[in-house]
Image (tube, grey):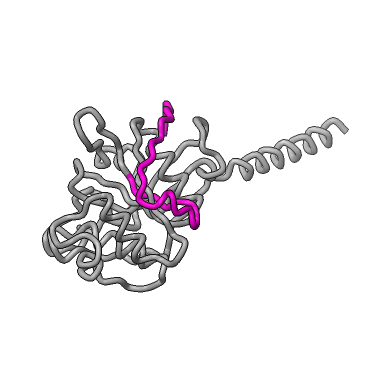
Amino acid sequence: MKITKTIISSIVLTLLLGLSYQIKAEWRFINSNVAHQSQKENWSCGPTTIAMWAGSIRRASLNPLTIADNCCGRDGTTIPEFMKGMFNNTPYGYVFSEWEYSDPEAAVKGVMWSVARFGEPVAVAGGSGTHYILIRGGRADYNPYTNYNENNHIRGVYVNDSTEGSPHYSAPVSGMYRGQEYPPEKLMRYWTKIGYPWDKKHRSIERGTYKAWDKQGKTYENNNVFTNF
């Protein structure tokens, strides 16, 4: 009888541990609709990144040069121009805002919050403000949208970098290739703070609430501070 009870107890414990593991099963998302595009000009990372992001929403292949001519010009892309390009190339109801982060851990959790909420990419201005990359997914302990807190750890990110495959670059300038997972620490080594000396922040372009027209083109600041990614 004691042996039977021991076996039953072991089985119950195993089931409970299995259930516990399932409850804590990690969250993973990669937007498979984002088709990679390589920039054909050394200045066109902005329009090319817009083409990848807006194209994934529209399920269409967009021409970066056409985007540049309609929003940004052929000499680089500012964050306001990037938001305008996204607004002009997405369906009715889509709006886009700039987010500023002082804390790197909050920056990672913040962009993953948006990725998880909308199931769409987020663009970040990296390389000291010289280059945009697209965050198209990631991996975390729990859903970053419903669990935006200290205890939910972001374990990895997936990016598209338009310099990958570009004739002007031998490798992605961010050091991150599409289809590969990278730790948040590597992302943050590239996603540096930019701005005036008294206002340097990690800056991103993120989708806003549907039809929230007052958010289009606006800048918002995230003042959260976390101790881990």
Above or below, 67 against 212 in this view is: below
Residue 38 pos. (x, y %): 22, 64
Above or below, 160 against 188 in this view is: below
Q: Which corner quadrant of the image does residue 24 belong to? A: top right
The image shows a total of numbered marks equal to: 0
Closer-to-camera residue (130/227): 130
| Residue at screen point 48% across, 56% down | 119
Closer-to-camera residue (182/191): 191
Q: Is residue 111 left or right of residue 167?
A: right
Closer-to-camera residue (219/166): 219
Which contiguous range is marked in magenta?
A: 204-229
Residue 184 pos. (x, y %): 35, 40
Residue 226 pos. (x, y %): 43, 28
Residue 143 pos. (x, y %): 53, 45
| Residue at screen point 25% across, 33% down | 200
Q: Is residue 192 left or right of residue 221?
A: left
Q: Does residue 223 show up magenta in the picture?
A: yes
Q: Is residue 104 left or right of residue 10?
A: left
Q: Residue furthest bottom?
A: 60
| Residue at screen point 34% across, 60% down | 86
Q: Does residue 156 show up magenta in the picture?
A: no
Looking at the figure, which quarter contains the C terminus? top left
Above or below, 114 against 34 in this view is: above
Q: Residue furthest front?
A: 214
| Residue at screen point 43% across, 40% down | 110
Looking at the figure, which quarter contains the N terminus? top right
Q: Is residue 17 left or right of residue 57?
A: right
Q: Which corner quadrant of the image does residue 64 belong to? A: bottom left
